[in-house]
Image (cartoon, helix red, strand yellow):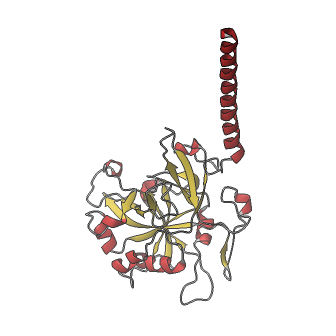
Amino acid sequence: MCGRTGLSLNKEQVQSACGYKPNDRNVYVKPDWLPEHNDGKNFVPSYNIAPTAVTPVLISSTKFKHTAKTNRVLKPMMWGIIPSWHKGDYKNHNLSTNNCRIENIKSSKLYGPLLACGGRCIIIAEGFYEWQTTFKSRVKQPFYIYAPQDENVKVDDPTTWNNEFTEGRGWKGIKLLHMAGLYHAWQNEGTIIYSYSVITMDSNNALDWLHHRMPAILDNQEQIEAWLDIDNVNADIALSYLKPTMLLTWHQVSTFVNSSRNKSDNCNKRLESKTTQKTLTAFFGKSEKRKSNEETKEDSKKIKKE
């Protein structure tokens, strides 16, 4: 599943990071950023993005030919699709639509029509969070999962990213995740809200140790192009491009991220190994002390008996 993401880049940086080379050009271009709707809610960069927040989503410009100059565009959308049949307050549809299972998309009353009508999109993120449950602890351990980075680039240290965009080379900086999804433009009494769901699938052995589900991540340009090309690539072929990726890396983070109110860079900071080692040392130290005390007591008993 996918219940939290992180994206700290601002609007201009996201456009640069999504730069691509069109088939009819020899230089990289930035996708247009389309005007926002979404009932006044705007994209706010954050290290801890939860459902109902608005984030940048990459889509084909086919449905926006009169306003877009590029064939890919970025459109801010709310996380969690509002069903087309819902009326009234969009916050009260009472359905869990943050994720959609790839196995049920075509037969779904909600997602099937969106897929058939070209509602394919790509959710942009620096990473996502997942929690590991163990039998030994009631506290779930959070992990931050992200794309493998170039040498010396640390995903939890923006000073190492060296973000840069040129028409000749495109984006050079932090590598982002591109998660396949579906979107819908919901309208009611003059209000228009664009919303999306992240497609999930069974985890492969890259991530099944952590969770049995994972987002459908597009890890190369061929997949990205096919998923966005709603004019020439039909739904069945597009779905065939969605495979569990092996190109992921991760690290443990603190439970600070557990609260969606916490938005700072403390959310994705790597847990220092010395903290874990200190905890283990303290634990085993206490065990040894208890053992020593018990042995002393036993010796005392033996002496008394003798």
Q: Nearer the viewer, residue 117 or 187?
A: 117
Residue 182, above or below 118:
above
Residue 138, above or below 33:
above
Q: Quadrant of residue 31?
A: bottom right
Please tell me how many numbered marks the rendered image carries.
0
Q: Quadrant of residue 166?
A: bottom right
Residue at 67% across, 15% down: 302
Which quadrant is the C terminus positioned in?
A: top right
Q: Residue 206 appears at what percent x and percent y?
A: 52, 63
Q: Nearer the viewer, residue 136 or 218?
A: 136
Q: Is residue 11 left or right of residue 160?
A: left
Residue at 70% across, 32% down: 285
Q: Residue 301 appears at what percent x and percent y?
A: 66, 13
Which quadrant is the N terminus positioned in?
A: bottom left
Q: Is residue 96 left or right of residue 5?
A: left
Residue at 36% across, 49% down: 91
Q: Residue 58 appears at what percent x and percent y?
A: 49, 70
Q: Nearer the viewer, residue 212 or 218?
A: 212
Residue at 35% across, 52% down: 96
Whether residue 171 is visible, yes or no, is: yes
Q: Nearer the viewer, residue 89 or 154?
A: 154
